[in-house]
Amino acid sequence: MDFKTGGRKVIERLVEAYGFTTRQALCDHLGVSKSTLATRYMRDLFPAEWVIQCTIETGVSAQWLTTGEGPRFNDARNDVIAIPRQKLIDGKLYDSNYYMFDKAFLPDGLKDPVVILDSDITYIADRQFDEVVDGKWLVEIEGRTSIRDLTRIPVGKVRVSGAGAEFDCGLGDIGVSALIKTQIENLT
């Protein structure tokens, strides 16, 4: 694309993107004089700064504004979610920014997701749950946090296994923080 020309069509798409019916309305919105816009329109000069402003203000695709090709809106931003990431180091959880995921990759029904990094394993977990069921969980045992397998056993107890140990205890004796929904393991 030649960014020295093409301004006429771009200005027409800017008017359309903002929902205006006249170039005068575009001038008023951008805070430029009618003669400035007319000069760019008549000389077919590419209005890069106006394209950037419009993209930021409206969410309209820069590709569509500049070329007229492709979708007007990039709806991919609606398909991506930022999930808080935490690192599990020596039995403690530390906040560690966010991971961006395509929603199609994630398990259905996540209500309060979190990503937990534990060495070479990445877990996607849900911190909101109705009850403790059999499965892999983020738990706290005597002040140390870890990922363990929990199995419900009669009369309010659970069997805790993992990390080379297995024991039974009351459900209230441990802190249960999140249900592991997905496990991703680095193989190299």
Image (tube, rainbow, N blue to C red):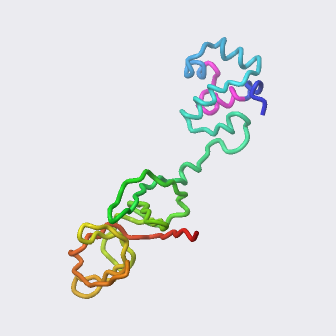
Which of the 4 image quarters holds residue 119? bottom left
Q: Is residue 47 above or below residue 183?
A: above
Point out the image quarter for the C terminus: bottom right
Residue 100, percent from left and from top: 51, 54
Which of the 4 image quarters holds residue 63? top right
Name the residue furthest bottom. Answer: 154
> Is residue 162 one of those drawn in magenta?
no
Residue at 72 percent of width and 25 percent of height: 46
Which of the 4 image quarters holds residue 167? bottom left
- The secondary structure that dominates the magenta segment is helix
Residue 182, percent from left and from top: 47, 70
Question: Quick one: 29 or 164, which is closer to the camera?
Answer: 164
Point out the image quarter for the N terminus: top right
Q: Is residue 28 above or below residue 101?
A: above
Residue 150, percent from left and from top: 34, 79
Question: Quick one: 135 or 173, which is closer to the camera?
Answer: 173
Residue at 71 percent of width and 18 percent of height: 40
Relative to 51, is 42 on the left or the right? right
Q: Is residue 4 above or below residue 162?
A: above
Segment colored magenta:
10-24
Residue at 71 percent of width and 14 percent of height: 39
